[in-house]
Image (tube, helix red, strand yellow):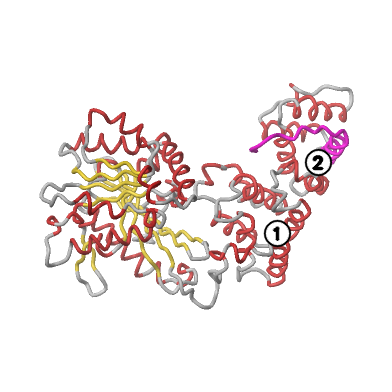
Amino acid sequence: MAGKDWELDDGQDVEELIASFESVFTNEDSLKQMLRLRLSVRWDTIKSGETYRDRLFNLIDSWAVAQGKVKQLVLAAVEWESDNLKIQKFVENHLENLLELDVNLLSKDALIELINVLKKINNFAKVWSIVQTILPERIALDRPKDVQALELPGLSNWVKCFTLLKLLLEDYPHFKQDSSILTFVDQLSRDASLDDTVKQVLRKWLDKVAPNFGQRSGEFTQPSSASSQPSSRGLQAYLMIMVNPEKTKLRATASLLCIAPTGVKKEVSVHLDPESNERGVLTTQKKLSQVVAQFIHRSTSIELERPENRLGCLYYELTIELFLPICYLCEPIDRWQVKDDINRLVSLGSKYRLVVRSYDRAIRPELRNAFFRAWDKTKSWREQNPESAVLDDKIYHLTKIDCIRLGALKEALKEKIGINITCPLPESTKEAEKFLYAILESGVPIGTWMRSCEQLASNVEVDINQFWTPELILNPGEFLEKVRSIRAFAFDEHEAPEQHWGGHLTVLWDDLERMPLVETLQAGG
């Protein structure tokens, strides 16, 4: 657990903990198993004392306190005997020591009151699903043991509630605009599948703890996904297609992430053949564009037509995100052809918001770590509502590529949130990949570059700079809509795309909040 450990300075606390352990572990065999299986500790190496109580005192005082593992010991015991009321009561009496509570937001009594409400909810899977919409998508990577515990059928609701609150209060307290736990209670109280009495209790709790929360977090006060009336605001839908090399071919898998204006999320695997057991689609580079078009058709004609996937929204905005290996990042995917509703062929980049994302960042630990670090800086910068002068210092404008000094470029990018490349990439495929890999190594999440621009007018730099404004960087949807509009102009039937810079533009926009696990995408169709 994060933060400072509980030192148990008060002798009465030690007495209470010993009594709780005597209740949970009625014999040493059970305690021995718990220590070995939950904490990887051998009881025989630390036990001493004539009586069982003496040995428990030694475990707590001479081992747990001395090594700063009191919290670990208590929580392991709670999970081991999750229905034991005495250890539960001990935890509730000492919540301020076992959780990092913000006393300005929540008191211990308010938290206990909330636990007592949550533990009575029969459909705990519903509670967990709402928490997942608030926590970052990397949660399974960050806290695998907690996620596993929350999905165990035999674990008591009380322990699951405590685990959820630990995640919301301690590990990710402010992942959304406001406190995570207030957002969670607000969304849960609006879920139509819960009993009305439970929802009323949750609303009363929220009104008592944070009377002005509804006004401070208007983003989450819209009707929930279960509302009978569609929301007047659109659903944000992201079709995430992962393309990974597999011997001499490519395997494409897809997942559709739907995000309602309320913040509620739902992720759906997109299967081209629901009856097939094959993971994704095995294809070639030549036929990849056709497979992408099929995933889009499946998503728009079937998945996004399902009311349960619309999450109560009247309409949707669809963004296509292609996770590509580095050797495909320069593919002209915006020129690929898809069919519209009346069977006309149109360019992918002019019809949809379209970005490339890095497949390598999703699978390579060092690249992923560099990206996470850069995203954290980017997020902090965006929360400051920066002005244009500040933005200019955070964007690296590159007008000439020097593949000999890529190390210096990589270091410079570590302090930036984006790179704007207004010169063509190297003609050599090897050099181009080497250059792009340096960008990925820096972790910088946003980038624009020209695949080629030798035939274009000299004002390309001025034209492409129109994207790099605080208003657009802070609103990715508007940024990508502007890109789509420029591409649509370039691909107009009266103008050859190669004669307009928009026909050469590639946009990289990696977003940590839409960084699904590799396993999640590979489960798609």
Check disc 1 and report the residue beneath it. Answer: 118
Query: Residue at 83% of width from left, 46% of height from top?
Result: 86
- Left or right: 137 as drawn, with respect to 293: right
Vertical comparison of 213 with 45: above or below: below
Query: x%, y% of residue 225?
Result: 53, 69
Disc 1 on helix, strand or loop?
helix
Query: x%, y% of residue 229?
Result: 51, 78
Vertical comparison of 214 with 327: above or below: below
Query: x%, y% of residue 468?
Result: 32, 51
Number of other residues with Cα within 10 Å of mark 2, as a class: few under 14, some 14 to 19, many 20 or more: many
Query: Residue at 26% of width from left, 28% of height from top?
Result: 405
Magenta residues, as a range? 1-24
Tell me which amino acid carries mark 2. Answer: Val
Quadrant hosting residue 350? bottom left
Vertical comparison of 491 with 398: above or below: below
Query: Residue at 39% of width from left, 53% of height from top?
Result: 470
Quadrant hosting residue 476? bottom left
Query: x%, y% of residue 213?
Result: 63, 63
Disc 2 on helix, strand or loop?
helix
Q: Which mark is residue 24?
A: 2
Query: Residue at 60% of width from left, 51% of height from top?
Result: 151
